[in-house]
């Protein structure tokens, strides 16, 4: 039996004449914590949207937990949970009500619902606040609730899109403690993006770096630093992707020159 839970082969996404994702291939193993890194406009979000059925690929194949994401979208959706970068909780509802609403959407049976909600709220230390409205929650509490909500239907894969953006250091550390607990105790696969490279270095078992729609390196943090002759993941990342600031679309001047410099530096 294969230990691969996410399989991407020759994935392409075009928007008109622009190629956002250019024939990428990679695999993620069951129970792995996988970091998907890249500058703004590199193709991260487009890839995640295709993996989570929000965008259809131009070509290539995507498989998640044995389901073809393009052709068996409903089954694929049942196999993953997702925590978006932008807040998505209803502030006028309580923590428990937010969980119940999500459970109904995912058709969690009524008999199973109450126990599942209690289990998850206890997992993220929010059971004592289950009857509090979300508008009274701190940013870290909201993120923890969003993770709990994303787990309500017992997914095999959890996608986290910059889950610690805007959180203080203490809350970030606490959140990653929960994430690692899901991986070690529940055997859950974690697929996350972040711009905090120390998080990827400390948490991820495997890291893939995408730039200009192409995966340019993949491996452990130690492998990436060794291959680039650097001392940290941040240094390796900057050597691979350059130091210039990108806009959200990834369009900036001197692309060919930067690519040439990067290739020259890695020879």
Image (cartoon, helix red, strand yellow):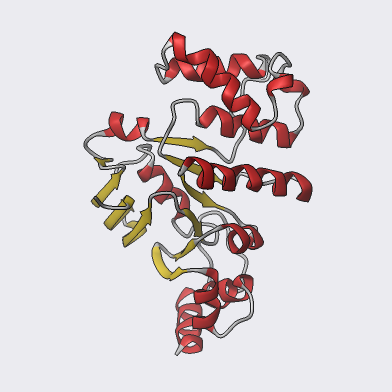
Residue 68 percent location from the top left of the image: 24, 41
Residue at image location 65% in from the left, 46% down from the top: 177
Residue at image location 59% in from the left, 18% down from the top: 98
Name the residue nearer the viewer: 110 or 159.
110
136 relative position to 32: left or right:
right
124 w.r.t. 85: above or below: above
28 w.r.t. 177: above or below: below
Q: Residue furthest top?
A: 110
Question: Can residue 16 be seen at all in this image of the molecule?
Answer: no
241 w.r.t. 123: above or below: below
Count of marks overlaid on the render: 0
Name the residue nearer the viewer: 84 or 21.
84
Q: Residue furthest front?
A: 185
Residue 163 percent location from the top left of the image: 61, 44
Residue at image location 58% in from the left, 58% down from the top: 247
Residue 99 percent location from the top left of the image: 56, 19
Name the residue nearer the viewer: 14 or 239.
239
**Quadrant in which the C terminus appears:** bottom left
129 w.r.t. 226: above or below: above
Residue at image location 41% in from the left, 43% down from the top: 49
Residue 108 percent location from the top left of the image: 42, 17
């Amino acid at each position: 039996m294969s230990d691969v839970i996410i399989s991407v082969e020759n994935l392409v996404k075009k928007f008109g004449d622009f190629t956002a994702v250019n024939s990428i291939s990679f695999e993620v193993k069951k129970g792995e914590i996988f970091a998907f890194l890249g500058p703004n406009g590199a193709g991260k979000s487009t890839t995640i949207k295709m993996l989570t059925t929000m965008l259809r690929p131009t070509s290539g194949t995507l498989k998640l937990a044995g389901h073809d994401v393009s052709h068996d979208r409903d089954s694929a959706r049942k196999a993953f949970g997702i925590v978006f970068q932008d807040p998505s909780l209803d502030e006028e509802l309580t923590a428990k009500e937010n969980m119940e609403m999500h459970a109904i959407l995912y058709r969690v049976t009524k008999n199973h619902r109450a126990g599942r909600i209690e289990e998850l709220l206890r997992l993220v230390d929010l059971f004592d606040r289950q009857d509090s409205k979300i508008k009274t929650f701190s940013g870290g509490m909201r993120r923890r609730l969003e993770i709990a909500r994303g787990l309500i239907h017992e997914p095999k894969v959890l996608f986290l899109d910059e889950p610690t953006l805007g959180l203080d250091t203490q809350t970030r550390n606490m959140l990653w403690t929960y994430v690692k607990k899901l991986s070690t105790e529940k055997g859950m696969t974690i697929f996350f993006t972040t711009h905090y490279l120390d998080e990827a270095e400390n948490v991820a078992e495997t890291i893939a770096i995408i730039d200009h729609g192409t995966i340019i390196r993949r491996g452990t943090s130690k492998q990436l630093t060794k291959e680039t002759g650097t001392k940290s993941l941040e240094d390796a990342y900057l050597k691979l992707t350059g130091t210039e600031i990108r806009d959200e679309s990834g369009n900036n001047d001197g692309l060919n020159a930067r690519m040439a410099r990067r290739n020259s530096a890695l020879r």
